[in-house]
Image (cartoon, rainbow, N blue to C red):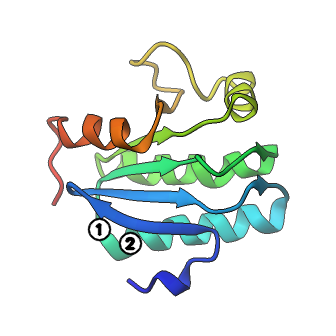
Amino acid sequence: MHPSQFRHLSVREEQGVLVLTLTEENLQGDRLAKALRQELLSALTSVHSRKVVLDFQKVTSLSSEIFRPLITLRHKLQENKGQLVICGLSPDVTKAFSATRLISSVRSSTSSFQVQPNSAVAIASLADSSAETP
């Protein structure tokens, strides 16, 4: 995996978990959504991990188009019995996810993303889970 291939993500592995950190402050528009989808799937394919943390720590705003690549990533992981945890949501980003009902306080909800406050907690939650990384 070559980090230079990713313009909108930084990619690393920690404790068998693929950690994808969004590098853009403002995630807006269809063009960025398409590029982000490609990068997310490319990162997933290059590392072959079934446990993924998507870190929003640098993101201050996002548009509705950005949910498409996130949902695609989640579905791809679910197809492979993988897990996705998002973390580092700012108050405004949390409001956007909540308004679309993509996050919920009910952990067992199948229509929502699992959320943790930061990448350390997210990584620990996946590293301690019963699902195994290939």
Q: Which residue is mark 1?
A: 48
Which disc number belongs to residue 45? Answer: 2
Q: Nearer the viewer, residue 121 or 132?
A: 121
Three-letter code for the amino acid on which mark 1 is drawn: His
Q: Nearer the viewer, residue 128 or 77?
A: 128
User: Residue 74 location in percent, x, y?
Assistant: 48, 46
Q: Name the residue: 50% across, 33% down.
A: 113
Dot 1 and dot 2 residues touching (CB under 8 Å): yes
Q: Secondary structure at mark 2?
A: helix
Residue 85 appears in which quarter of the rendering?
top left
Above or below, comparing residue 71 to residue 18 in the picture? above
Q: Name the residue: 51% across, 68% down.
A: 10
Q: Secondary structure at mark 1?
A: loop
Q: Name the residue: 48% across, 31% down.
A: 117
User: Residue 81 location in percent, x, y?
Assistant: 28, 46
- Left or right of 27 in this view: 51: left
User: Residue 69 location in percent, x, y?
Assistant: 63, 55
Q: CA distance from mark 1 to mark 2?
A: 5 Å
Q: Name the residue: 64% across, 69% down.
A: 8
User: Residue 47 location in percent, x, y?
Assistant: 32, 71
Three-letter code for the amino acid on which mark 2 is drawn: Thr
